[in-house]
Image (cartoon, rainbow, N blue to C red):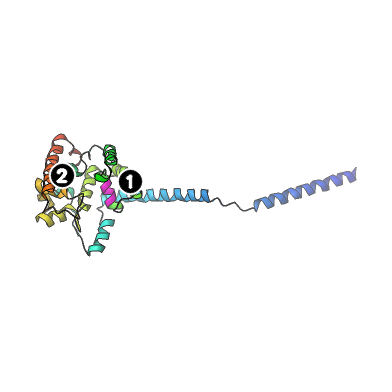
Amino acid sequence: MANDAMVRATRDGKRAGGSRRRKGTGAATPRRFRPIRWLTRWVFRIVFMALGLTLAALTTFALINPPTTPYMISERARLGSVAHDWVPLEEIAPVMARSVVAAEDANFCLHWGLDIEAIRAALGEGASRGGSTISQQTVKNVFLWQGRSWLRKSIEAVVTPLMELVWSKERIIEVYLNVIEFGPGIFGVEAAAQQFFGKPASALSSAEAARLATVLPSPQTRNAANLTTMMLRRAAAIEDGAATIARDGRADCFE
């Protein structure tokens, strides 16, 4: 009996020791590298970091005027210098804001950053027209780069609604008027008014504001002080449009 008990005890001890050895061996096995999981994790991290930085920049520029833009930096490097003088919205003739809205984004007060109907129309007509709202153009000019690419347009489509949540319509139109290009190396409505008409932005007439708005689609090739006959007709249409949106309430969100 005693011998049988000793045999059983020895056998159980061996089993326990073997079990401990197996457990110890399993714990030391390295984890297998999974590249798809690793890549997915880092993509999410980068996206969240970019989103956080974007929200921080949007919040900052809701209160502080952007000192420059990526495009201004590139044009300064190309030309040697640029003309740019920031003025608050209160020091810009109201007809100037109405003119750029009439020319570029008549539904500015009605959308949340993306004008779906305008985008559909642009897709339907191909490259002959654009579908970007003033809000989208502001995002592009303040935060992104120039040129046509699906990457930039995709980022722009994500950031624009966020900007609309953080900024008021008045702030969007103020920043837009101060960073948009009106001619080679001429940025912002104050520099444009001085360059083309020899007066501050606060003193612009309806005809002068319409002329400035006319050059926006192609500021590198159009001169607000020397428009072609076709462009003068376009300026007259913009002047009428600015008066129309003042009457029908489509300028209420920024005036």
Q: Nearer the viewer, residue 10 or 238?
A: 238
Marks 2/1: CA–CA distance: 25 Å
Q: Main secondary structure of the magenta part?
A: helix
Image mark for residue 159 = 1
- Residue 88, position as x, y percentages in the image: 18, 50
Q: Residue at x 31, y 42 (%)?
A: 161
In the image, is 246 to the left or to the right of 155? Answer: left
In the image, is 228 to the left or to the right of 76? Answer: left
Rate crowding at label 2 as few (under 14), some (14 to 19) or many (20 or more) other CA atoms within 10 Å.
Answer: many
Disc 1 on helix, strand or loop?
helix
Q: Where does the C terminus fall, quadrant-wise?
A: top left
Q: Where does the N terminus fall, quadrant-wise?
A: top right
Amino acid type, mark 2:
Ser
Residue 140 within the segment the image draws in magenta: yes
Residue 14 within the segment the image draws in magenta: no
In the image, is 157 to the left or to the right of 184? Answer: right
Disc 2 on helix, strand or loop?
helix
- Residue 164, position as x, y percentages in the image: 29, 42
Q: Earlier in the sequence, mark 2 or mark 1?
A: 2
Q: Residue at x 33, y 46 (%)?
A: 159
In the image, is 202 to the left or to the right of 156? Answer: left
Q: Residue at x 35, y 46 (%)?
A: 154
- Residue 192, position as x, y percentages in the image: 15, 54
Amino acid type, mark 1:
Val
Q: Residue furthest bottom?
A: 80
> Looking at the image, can residue 69 be seen?
no
- Residue 166, position as x, y percentages in the image: 30, 44
Per the rendered image, the range of residues in magenta is 136-141
Q: Where does label 2 land, which residue?
A: 99
